[in-house]
């Protein structure tokens, strides 16, 4: 030792411990993270849960052995600390250190022989970097910089520090644990795919130059390849052991994976591990194959005598016992085992072929699984078809039996008729003279009668002429009656149409929507509605069929006549809250709400839908109230702006509005927007592209069904409508079906069920006034409406089921005493309920569900009962 200045030794015994501990720690962390956190179940899985447990480094526990951990570990630690080589050739090792490059080339066999007997523990810190050909390349400086950074693995590293080699004197101290923590942390930052200066450099060399990093990549590819090579070598060198392992179901990844991952530190004492590291640095990583084969060869007789469970335990815990701590024998025996590079390369190539074959078989299995599923579905379809054919065959067989019975009956009847015919023939042959005489007599009588009838016929001819004249007069009278009736019907229906559809005055010119020509082409029957020519029904589908189609599939409604507008400016919510009862300040972006415009008396000027967007309010209101609504808004807008309010109001004139309603509306629209609308809830609004056209979409409607209202650039509305209609589940629908659908849904029609004399509380729309608005007010008519919420009203809107003829708007509602207590505002037969339904208003106290009333329909009293609305359950997408 005098020739070696220990003060210049770069690697102390503690550094050796840090390196071994660090490598074990890195392997432990990577194995744990790979097995625990991989998203790909096939990436790191072994063939069984037991094998994964065998791969994972153990947590020291007194329950794993009959000996106390301190009694088992302390002798090993003390041996490492106290044992000194007695026959160390210090001159030899001085030459190695002074000129390693030349010496390693000229005296390689002598160097290998000396390493078999172990590098002196005092020199390992100097020899290992030489053997590893460590090149600093600034790694030590890099290491200092890495220590200043944070690692995502710090928590996992700290958690496991005390668990690995807990009885080693150096690692029991705070200094040892801090050194270990620094190296593992620095390497986790140096190589992000895995989690003091000299130890760090050597660790980098082990991972990169000795290709040990491939043991710990997420797929463990290099580890799997080495285990495959080890199996091949085991079959070559120890065929009896290989055959016994095969018979017992023991595979190399149950025991050898621990050797390769931890460099035998999993169960072997540190003094053995140091000697293995000596060999590893000199001979390379292939020495692990030789050491593993040497261990199995030495224990061959014991191995061949054990069954599965005992064998696995022995391979894990007792393999080194046979050497009696003489590691030199183990290494010497391993050096005697010669493994050719060509054989290893062939095994590596075979592994790659097997891997490719396994991947191909996995793909084939998956393909066969899909084909099997398809064949199963085809079988089920054919089985169903076969059962249908069997049922049809049974029906045909029954019919055949019936026909045979019928044929037999007809045959018997035919025979009876033949006998009767023979009998009649005989009678005719016997009495021809009698018949002739009788005929002559009868002819004389007939002549007399004929003369009398001729006279009567002449009289009837005269009467017939008089009747024909009378029929012509009746037809003329009927024609006049029809013309008169048509005129009366037109007069009677004109005010009714105004109520049901909020039509414009007759003096106003009838306007056309952008879809007018499209409606005509589709067979739409056009009628005046809210100042527009709108389809009431279509030639291919009557109102009833269109109603049912909307409930079962999806229908498109033209609502382009509706008034669309937009408010912008930072005070838009504040201004509009003075006109409607909604709480717009707390309405989230992308959400909408049904609300109403109110006047100073608390009456409803119009109902409207308001959508909150990032920089604007999108508003839709009734076409029939457009002039009235615009005048109302602009009047109050001018006052608000004069007071310094920042708000602008614009009518949207370049977009048309269509609605698609029904349970299959979402599926039809998803084909055009190219994505799922499952997260698009009822009364929400978005700007989206429909078939590449920018549109505003609101998930809302007027039918009680799920649906959407699309504000489409007018020049694209026909194209979008045609593309929606291309879906086989979609049809066009008109005003007739829309009115019966909204009635079943219990929705109000402005002009019929609500108007400027109706307050929201009377109409059952109190829910449109949020709690915040009830507390603060601030909207027109609040002083009339808010007291009604607390004190009640004199009349209430109710739903009725009516017996007999349908009750239309204007029909009187009577109590059982015959007193008029209310009026029907809307009514029609319900296609879904097969009953007549109606909406109306009754005096307070007569509005309870189940109350029996009467309705006067064309002066006929019919029974009715109050029913909860909606009449048909709504199907909105929540």
Image (cartoon, helix red, strand yellow):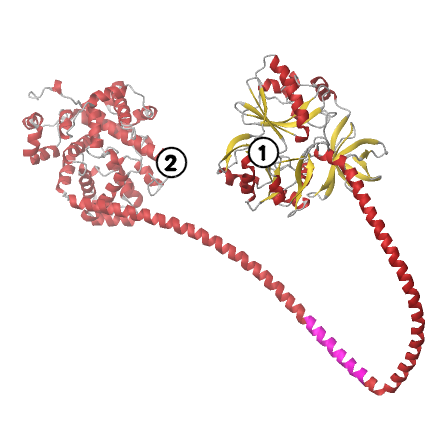
Mark 2 — residue? 39
Q: List x then y, in percent, for residue 352.
A: 26, 45
Prevailing SS of the magenta stretch: helix
Residue 706: numbered disc: none
The magenta segment is 405-425
Residue 409 on the magenta segment: yes
Mark 2, residues whose alpha carbon is within 10 Å: few (<14), some, or many (≥20)? Answer: few
371 shown above or below 193: below
Mark 1 — residue? 656
Q: List x then y, in percent, for residue 331.
A: 15, 37
Depth order, front residue of 144/527: 527
- Total labels drawn: 2
Question: Could you tell me if residue 77 is visible in this image?
Answer: no
- Say which quarter of the image contains residue 62: top left
Cα gap from disc 1 to disc 2, whole angstroms: 49 Å
SS state under label 2: loop
Depth order, front residue of 280/802: 802
- For the N terminus, give its image quadrant: top left
127 shown above or below 399: above
Q: Name the residue: 42% across, 50% down.
A: 370
- Say which quarter of the image contains residue 336: top left
């Amino acid at each position: 030792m005098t020739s070696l200045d220990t003060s210049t030794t770069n690697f102390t015994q503690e550094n050796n411990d840090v390196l071994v501990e660090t490598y074990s720690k890195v392997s432990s962390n990577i194995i744990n993270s790979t097995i625990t956190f991989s998203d790909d179940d096939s990436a790191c899985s072994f063939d069984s849960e037991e094998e994964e447990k065998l791969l994972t480094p153990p947590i020291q526990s007194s329950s794993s052995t009959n000996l106390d951990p301190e009694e088992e570990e302390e002798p090993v630690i003390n041996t490492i600390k106290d044992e000194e080589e007695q026959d160390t050739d210090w001159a030899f090792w001085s030459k190695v250190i002074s000129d390693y490059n030349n010496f390693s080339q000229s005296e390689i066999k002598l160097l290998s022989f000396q390493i078999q007997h172990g590098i002196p523990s005092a020199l390992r810190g100097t020899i290992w970097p030489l053997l590893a050909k460590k090149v600093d390349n600034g790694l030590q400086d890099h290491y200092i910089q890495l220590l200043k950074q944070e690692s995502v693995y710090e928590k996992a590293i700290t958690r496991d520090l005390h668990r690995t080699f807990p009885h080693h004197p150096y690692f029991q101290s705070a200094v040892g644990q801090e050194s270990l923590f620094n190296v593992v942390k620095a390497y986790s930052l140096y190589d992000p795919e895995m989690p003091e200066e000299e130890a760090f450099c050597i660790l980098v060399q082990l991972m990169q130059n000795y290709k040990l990093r491939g043991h710990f990549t997420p797929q463990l590819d290099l580890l799997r390849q080495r285990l495959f090579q080890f199996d091949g070598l085991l079959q070559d060198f120890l065929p009896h052991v290989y055959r016994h392992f095969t018979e017992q179901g023991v595979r190399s990844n149950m025991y050898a994976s621990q050797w390769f991952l931890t460099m035998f530190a999993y169960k072997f004492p540190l003094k053995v591990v140091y000697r293995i590291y000596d060999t590893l640095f000199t001979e390379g990583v292939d020495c692990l194959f030789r050491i593993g084969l040497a261990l199995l060869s030495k224990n061959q007789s014991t191995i061949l005598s054990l069954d599965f469970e005992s064998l696995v335990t022995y391979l894990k815990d007792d393999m080194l016992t046979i050497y009696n701590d003489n590691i030199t024998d183990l290494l010497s025996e391993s050096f005697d085992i010669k493994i050719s590079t060509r054989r290893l390369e062939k095994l590596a190539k075979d592994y790659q072929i097997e891997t490719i074959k396994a991947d191909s078989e996995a793909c084939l299995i998956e393909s066969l699984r899909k084909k099997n599923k398809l064949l199963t579905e085809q079988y089920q379809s054919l089985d169903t078809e076969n059962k249908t054919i069997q049922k049809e065959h049974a029906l045909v067989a029954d019919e055949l039996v019936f026909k045979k019975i019928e044929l037999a009956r007809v045959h018997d009847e035919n025979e009876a008729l033949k006998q009767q015919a023979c009998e009649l023939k005989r009678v005719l042959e016997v009495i021809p003279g009698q018949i002739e005489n009788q005929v002559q007599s009868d002819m004389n009588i007939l002549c007399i009668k004929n003369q009398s009838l001729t006279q009567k016929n002449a009289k009837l001819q005269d009467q017939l002429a008089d009747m024909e004249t009378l029929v012509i007069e009746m037809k003329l009278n009927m024609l006049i009656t029809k013309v008169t009736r048509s005129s009366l019907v037109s007069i009677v229906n004109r005010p009714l149409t105004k109520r049901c559809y909020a039509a414009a005055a007759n003096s106003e010119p009838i306007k056309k929507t952008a879809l007018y020509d499209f409606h005509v082409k589709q067979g739409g029957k056009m009628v005046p509605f809210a100042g527009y020519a709108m389809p009431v029904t279509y030639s291919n589908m009557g109102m009833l069929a269109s109603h049912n189609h909307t409930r079962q599939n999806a229908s498109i409604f033209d609502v382009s006549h509706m008034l669309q507008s937009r408010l912008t400016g930072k005070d838009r919510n504040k201004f509009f809250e003075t006109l409607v009862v909604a709480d717009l300040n707390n309405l989230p972006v992308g959400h909408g709400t049904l609300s109403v415009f109110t006047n100073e008396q608390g009456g409803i000027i119009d109902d409207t839908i308001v959508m909150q967007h990032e920089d604007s309010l999108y508003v839709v209101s009734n076409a029939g109230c457009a002039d009235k609504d615009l005048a109302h808004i602009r009047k109050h807008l001018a006052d608000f702006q004069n007071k310094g309010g920042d708000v602008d109001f614009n009518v949207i004139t370049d977009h048309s509005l269509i609605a698609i309603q029904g349970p299959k509306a979402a599926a039809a629209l998803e084909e055009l927007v190219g994505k799922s609308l499952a997260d698009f809830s009822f009364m929400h609004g978005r700007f989206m592209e429909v078939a590449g056209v920018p549109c505003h979409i609101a998930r809302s409607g007027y039918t009680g069904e799920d649906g959407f209202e699309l504000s489409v650039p007018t020049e694209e509305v026909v194209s979008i409508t045609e593309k929606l209609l291309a879906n086989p589940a979609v049809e066009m629908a008109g005003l007739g079906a829309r009115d019966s659908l909204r009635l079943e849904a219990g929705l109000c029609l402005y002009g019929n069920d609500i108007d400027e004399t109706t307050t929201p509380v009377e109409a059952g729309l109190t829910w449109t006034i949020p709690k915040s608005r009830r507390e603060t007010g601030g909207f027109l008519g609040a002083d009339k409406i808010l007291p009604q919420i607390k004190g009640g009203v004199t009349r209430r809107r109710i739903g009725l089921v009516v017996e007999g003829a349908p009750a239309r708007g204007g029909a009187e509602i009577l109590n059982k005493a015959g007193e008029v207590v209310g009026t029907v505002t809307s009514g029609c037969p319900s296609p879904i309920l097969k009953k007549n339904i109606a909406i109306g208003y009754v005096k307070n106290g007569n509005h309870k569900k189940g109350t029996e009333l009467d309705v006067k329909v064309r002066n006929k009293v019919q029974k009715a009962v109050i029913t909860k609305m909606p009449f048909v359950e709504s199907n909105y997408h929540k």
